[in-house]
Amino acid sequence: MSAYNQTVASITFRAVLGRRRALLFAIPALVLIGTAAVLRLTHPADPAWPTRILGSFGFSVVLPLTALIIGTSVLGAEIEDGSIIHVLATPVRRRAVILTKYVVAVATTVVFACVPELLAGIIATGGLTRFAVGLFVGALAGAVIYNALFVSLSAATTRALAVGLLYVLLWEGVLANFTGGARVLSIGHYALAMAVAVAPGSGIDPGISLAAACVLGAVVTVAALVLAIRKLSAFSLRADAA
Amino acid sequence: MSPETTGVIHDLGYQRYDGGRLGRMQIVRTLYWYSLRAAFGLGRGARAKILPVGLFALMCAPAVVEAVIVARGGTRAVPYDTYVFPLRVVVMTIFVAAQAPELVSKDRRCRVLPLYFARPLHRGDYPLAKFAALTVACLAMIDVPLVLLYAGTISSLHSGSAIWGETRALLPGLLIGALWSVTLTVVGLAIASFSGRRAYTTGAIAVFFFLSWSLAQFLVTVGGRGPVTQPTLAGLVSPFTILDGVRLWLGGTATGPLPAVGRYGPAYGLSLLVLLVVPALVLAARYRKEDAA
Amino acid sequence: MTGIELRGVSRWYGNVVAVNDITMTVGPGVTGLLGPNGAGKSTLLHMVAGFLQPSRGQVTLGGEPAWRNPGLYRKAGIVTERESAYPFLTGREFVRAAACLHELADPVAATRRAIGLVDMVGPMDRRIATYSKGMRQRIRVAAALVHDPEVLLLDEPFNGMDPRQRLHMMDLLGRLGGQGRTILFSSHILEEVEQLSGTIQVMVAGRLAASGDFRAIRRLMTSRPHVFLVRSGDDRRLGAALIGRPAVSGVELTRGGLQVSASDYGAFAAEIARLTRDEGIRLRELLPADESLESVFSYLVSS
């Protein structure tokens, strides 16, 4: 099958998980779960904070930040130090390279952001409630869409992390909450819409409809991956190092 | 023909330099100046300038908007000492996360540190110069918009006492800005000095600043009786809220994320001190090692 | 049909022309791409390897275009200049990964063979992070050879190698070239190219200054006199006779023999035979004095 390559997958997994960078995306998850646990112990009866810690902290901060670190490191690191050549100087199709790395990124994000979101949800709401499951589903969607964007950014520019930060912090963090129109272009809100669809009545207003979120999310994912494949197919080496 | 077995060193006209040499201070000053320029992408290609200049423009945007509003007779909504707090947090996080590695990680990656330390440059001078450069850069990012806001406001004012009032309001804002610059710089550089890979350190700084800020924001608004969730102590989780706590302690108004500080003021002060001293020591230690390359 | 062909290939970056209208053919055997730093050798190699698009012109390997053609890498192996192998893999895992990526039927055997070729069997189970620069270079060559390519491209392959490793690598490349593969390597060090390749392509400031056998190139440079060392029965008399001939531009009596500068190689060759016969001088030795690549290179570069 020319969409997945096991060798690329194992190298990418080892590269992503085997270094100090893995700490970077373990920490947000631990903070999320830890905070939920502490709050559960100290405020068991307060109904307001579960929504907020899972929604605005877990969903809007931990998920995109983790996806950013992971999504930019599956491809970005190899392009930056030139070791991508060892994969590209083979008959492996560029499509397979991008899609395999994307799958690795999504899988890693699921482990380090979505599952912690579910665990925090279970802790916060006292069990496998619909709310917790809803947010888990939304986080899965977020992992899928966010990583497509960030892998694509890594293929397009060497400053993918900085651009991604601008998107997550500035666009999604500040603008999308203030102006209604910007929500149409905010991946976080697509994911939120899907979460709310599974768990209605949670009090969160995603700002866009489920149908719009699904369509836009699919469009963004596919477009980003196609762009990434095209960029990698035309990968060029500059003559000077660094 | 018999081969030559002796060697000769030829006189190529190389002359010993016996004149005056610029001293250590000059080296530090040059390193500072060069790093300051690098923090804004000057002296490199156009692409290096996009991010810092763009962020700077973003920071100035509220000042410009406010100046227009005041000129049309409206009232000022943006204070000097907190400005637009969320915008400031986001812009400074991205700025420090992107530029601190540019100053510090890049040297480590390209292994030029031995070149620096083979000069009459003491081990502490290098981080000092970098610290000075990034602090001034952050200062420009934070205080210049304040000055713009001030200029825009007083141009619509006419009475001397009103202008004096504005000036008195501006000065604490500038000082708070200076405090921000110093703190963010020392923390950012300390994190960045740990690795030569820009992506790691950018990610680490971004995660640290933004995660702690989001957590603090969240904790501050969670009411309750437990110690961790007291509105006034929750700010200790994040450098940004620690700075705001210190500002409140020093007599500022509740225009920022923290509602009040109360008797926890000294706790914030102490935390700020720790936040300044510990990264500074780490930074100095990172370059004191024998093999700081 | 495994040659490399470039037709009118140029590459520019804005106002800077890195490669300037190069047309050349590289056939089987070892070809050295020679030139000073900044001559555009790496740029050219990247274009041949399919990792840079020419601004103009075409690059083909064995008839197939080089750009955007992943299938090309079934018969080509590339070793780039930047050292960048995955530090967390062992040497064996790295070459094995390359073998799997090339979809080889028996990756284990191919890995073994390739690692044996570059003489890295000892350290192959250590992580690449622990390798020296020369070892990293060799393991990358192994990865480039694992699929038994017909074409091998190497950018400054001897960088960072100690003399023993260099000799070994030269021997390896020479053998591979002798098997009929097309090997193109770049270097700015004359001795490497001189010892290894018979055919050279000389690049200066982005242009192709000369190509072919370096001795043949030398002979083409008639603007500079050829210098020969002649030993005969009576050097002085021969020298006196030679200086009178138009093909000879200078004669010098040295302890090793007669150094003759000839402006016209062909005419001189005929002249000296006739002269020595007419004068009755026995000709013992006639050697070109400056055939080494170094003199070719410096002539080409300075002209």
Image: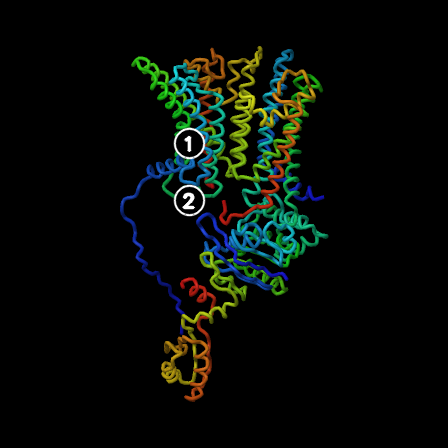
The lab-note entry on whether marks 2 and 1 share a chain reads yes
**Residue wearing tag 2:** B115
Q: Residues within 10 Å of mark 1 (few under 14, many from 20)?
A: many
Q: CA distance from mark 2 to mark 1?
A: 21 Å
Could you tell me the amino acid type at mark 2?
Leu
Q: Mark 2: which secondary structure?
A: helix
Determine whether A72 is above or below C127 in the image.
above
Residue C78 visible in the shown view = yes
Q: Position of residue A24 (x, y in %)?
A: 57, 31
Looking at the image, the residue that sits furthest to the front is B72
Give the number of the mark in front: 2 or 1: 1
Q: Looking at the image, which is closer to me, B99 or B277?
A: B99
Could you tell me the amino acid type at mark 1?
Leu
Q: Looking at the image, which is closer to me, A191 or B293?
A: A191
Tell me the quarter of the picture where residue C157 sits. Answer: bottom right
Q: Is residue B225 left or right of residue B259?
A: right
Q: Position of residue A2 (x, y in %)?
A: 69, 44
Q: Position of residue B200 (x, y in %)?
A: 54, 35
**Residue at 47% in and 28% down:** B187
Q: Looking at the image, which is closer to me, B165 or C172?
A: B165
Q: Position of residue B46 (x, y in %)?
A: 44, 39
Q: Residues within 10 Å of mark 2 (few under 14, many from 20)?
A: few
> Mark 2 or 1 closer to N-term?
2
**Residue wearing tag 1:** B134
Q: Mark 1: which secondary structure?
A: helix
Tag 2 subunit: B
Residue C160 visible in the shown view = no
**Image mark for residue B48:** none
Determine whether C176 is above or below A164 in the image.
below
Tag 1 subunit: B
Determine whether B217 is above or below A72 in the image.
above
**Residue at 37% in and 76% down:** C249
